[in-house]
Amino acid sequence: MSAEPNNKKAQEQELWDRISTTEGAERAEVLDELSHIAYNRDNYIECLQLVDTSIDIYFQHGGLDCYLKELIHLYQGRAHCYENLKRFAEAAETHEELAKMKYLENDFENQAEELRAAGRAWYRIEHWRKSLDNHLAAKAVIDPDTTPLTMGIDLLNIGMALAKLKNHQDAIDNYLSARSLCKEAKNPEFVNWCDNYLALSYIALNNGLEAKFHAQHYFNYTKVAEDLGMEGYARYRLGMAHLLCEEYEDAEAHLTRSLQILTLEEDKDWEDIVAVNKELAKVLVALDRQEEAQSRLDRIKTIEDTLAA
């Protein structure tokens, strides 16, 4: 039998014993070590409590002026705990604090990374304006080592937040710039994501021709990558674009196939399944097949009501 588990328990107990015999920065270091043990066994609540206590001690003994590196390390641990606990608002606020600390270190690359992390966390909980503000701040950081791909991803993130704020024309402007930068970086994956979001914003503006152009590129990528799950969404975009262009047979084919793919998923995206059915009903009405359209709408009624409840 391995003695390693017993050794780990003894080491942990030794650290707890040291709490009563240490003070100041030394105690904060011990608490930090204990927080790593808690984190490694997925006890994020305990880890967070230990981290917060350690942070408090450092601020009582000089704060950022004396313990900048130590506090950066602890704030990173705090952010990871919040993310694992799905407390995304607190995670976002922690990343914002980390961005300020990275600025004090003149670490502009990681300052921007923390701002991006804050923007992503705010986006997850639908705080679109805060997400946008952080991604704009990340883009504004002067980092001589930034790459075309990084700049492209910043613009893509800005566009996504703008689209959520219903500012689709500005979103499109950012997506198009992002697409050019991602092409310059020779990154097909992110060019594809730009095409996806461009199609969505053009659809929101009822611009069928431009929507169809970008949706077709998105669809082409999914076929080359042989990504069936993504193909379901690409056909949804393409079907809506054809509908806007009054190309009803093509719209019906893509939307029907989209549903076939989306409903294959074990973890079904019911909101999009309902949305595709509703778009398909519009196509059927345009094709003078009102009874089919109504039958389709009747079938999804219970699911639609459930989602709206």
Image: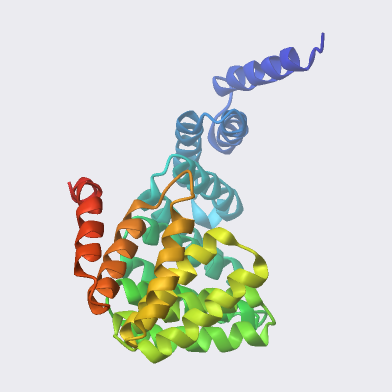
Task: Return the residue found at the far top.
Answer: 1
Residue at (45% x, 31% y) in the render: 45
Query: Looking at the image, is 32 positioned above or below residue 207?
Result: above
Q: Position of residue 300 (x, y in %)?
A: 25, 52
Q: How is the image coloured?
A: rainbow
Residue 93 showing in the rendered view: yes
Residue 106 showing in the rendered view: no
Which of the 4 quarters of the picture holds residue 127?
A: bottom left
Q: Position of residue 65 (x, y in %)?
A: 52, 57
Residue 96 relative to residue 18: left or right:
left
Query: Looking at the image, is 292 positioned above or below residue 147?
Result: above
Residue 149 relative to residue 208: left or right:
right
Name the quadrant of the N terminus: top right
Query: Looking at the image, is 241 positioned above or below residue 269?
Result: below
Query: Looking at the image, is 128 positioned above or below residue 68?
Result: below
In front: 186, or 137? 186
